[in-house]
Image (cartoon, coloured by chain):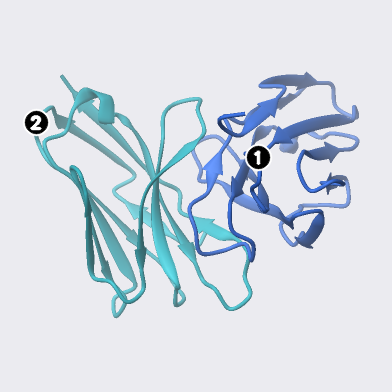
Chain colours: A cyan, B blue
């Protein structure tokens, strides 16, 4: 079953605007990762944030993590048409679990 | 190779046929995962290998699904007597570290299976 829930399911913005996607999960985590998937392709790792971190940056990406609310957000600043893709959060629950658990994803469309 | 390689990229099977999907992970990567992705959904875990050992197969949906990684590198996912509900993209991912969790996964492009 899928643990994470991304919100919104779909997002359409103009090029240059910021895009914010949210992810909620149910049980405690070791870390949370965000992945991107272009249509018909595999997933590409974007960023990993550990449970003891609150915010992380990578280029135009900013990720926040609130473990008390069991939620994370991914902000893409100054979006480009090439950012059009589906974005998934994935949670690692540790405790001997080997799997990353993915959400259903947010489909982002950036209009030129 | 430079990345995770999967073959075939596309497979059409008649219901009841057996299929085999291959994954060639990044050289030296200890961990290998298989995920199933239905249309419009996120990937769902199927099974995990650490080297040649299959440490978790809890996500395999039925005994028609079987995976192996006999020499700790290439892996094959086999589906026997395919059913229409098996239609999905099957993604393979590898990571450098053992223990399964905790690090970045490198995904292949996937094998899209369509069962008629």
Question: At 84% across and 38% down in the image, what residue appears?
Answer: B79
How far across and how far down the image is residue B103, in percent?
49, 58
Q: CA distance from mark 2 to mark 1?
A: 39 Å
B105 sits to left or right of A106: right
Work out whether residue B62 or residue A49 is closer to the camera in this orientation and state it: A49
Work out whether residue A34 or residue B30 is closer to the camera in this orientation and state it: B30
Q: Are marks 2 and 1 in contact (CB under 8 Å)?
A: no
Work out whether residue A55 or residue B12 is closer to the camera in this orientation and state it: A55
Question: At 44% across and 77% down in the image, what residue appears?
Answer: A28
Q: Quadrant of the N terminus of chain A?
A: bottom right
Question: At 82% across and 46% down in the image, what residue appears?
Answer: B69
A8 sits to left or right of B115: left
Which of discs 2 and 1 lies nearer the camera? The answer is: 1
Specify whether disc 2 shares its chain with disc 1: no
How far across and how far down the image is residue B43, in percent?
56, 46
Q: Which residue is mark 2?
A: A16
Q: Which residue is mark 1?
A: B27
A56 sits to left or right of B32: left
Q: Quadrant of the C terminus of chain A?
A: top left
Q: Is residue A80 above or below residue B70?
A: above
A87 sits to left or right of A95: left
| Badge count | 2
Work out whether residue A108 or residue B66 is closer to the camera in this orientation and state it: B66
Q: Residues within 10 Å of mark 2 (few under 14, many from 20)?
A: some
How far across and how far down the image is residue B107, in percent?
55, 39
Q: Is residue B66 above or below residue A101?
A: above
Q: Is residue A30 above or below residue A63?
A: below
- Chain assignment, label 1: B
- Chain assignment, label 2: A
């Amino acid at each position: 079953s899928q643990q994470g829930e991304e919100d919104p399911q779909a997002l359409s913005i103009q090029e240059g605007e910021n895009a914010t996607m949210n992810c909620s999960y149910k049980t405690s985590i070791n870390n949370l990762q965000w992945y991107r998937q272009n249509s018909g392709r595999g997933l590409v790792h974007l960023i990993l944030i550990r449970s003891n971190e609150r915010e992380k940056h990578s280029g135009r990406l900013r990720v926040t993590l609130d473990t008390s609310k069991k939620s994370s957000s991914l902000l893409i600043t100054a979006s480009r048409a090439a950012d059009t893709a589906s974005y998934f959060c994935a949670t690692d629950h540790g405790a001997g679990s080997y799997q990353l658990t993915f959400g259903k994803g947010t489909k982002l469309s950036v209009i030129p | 190779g430079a990345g995770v390689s999967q073959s075939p990229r596309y497979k059409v099977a008649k219901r009841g046929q057996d299929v085999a999907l291959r994954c060639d992970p990044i050289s030296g990567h200890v961990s290998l995962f298989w995920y199933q992705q239905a249309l419009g959904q996120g990937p769902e875990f199927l099974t995990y290998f650490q080297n040649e050992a299959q440490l978790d197969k809890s996500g395999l949906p039925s005994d028609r699904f079987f995976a192996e990684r006999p020499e700790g590198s290439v892996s094959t996912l086999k589906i026997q007597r395919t059913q229409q509900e098996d239609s999905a993209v099957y993604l393979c991912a590898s990571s450098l570290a053992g223990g399964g969790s905790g690090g970045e996964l490198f995904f292949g492009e996937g094998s899209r299976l369509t069962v008629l």
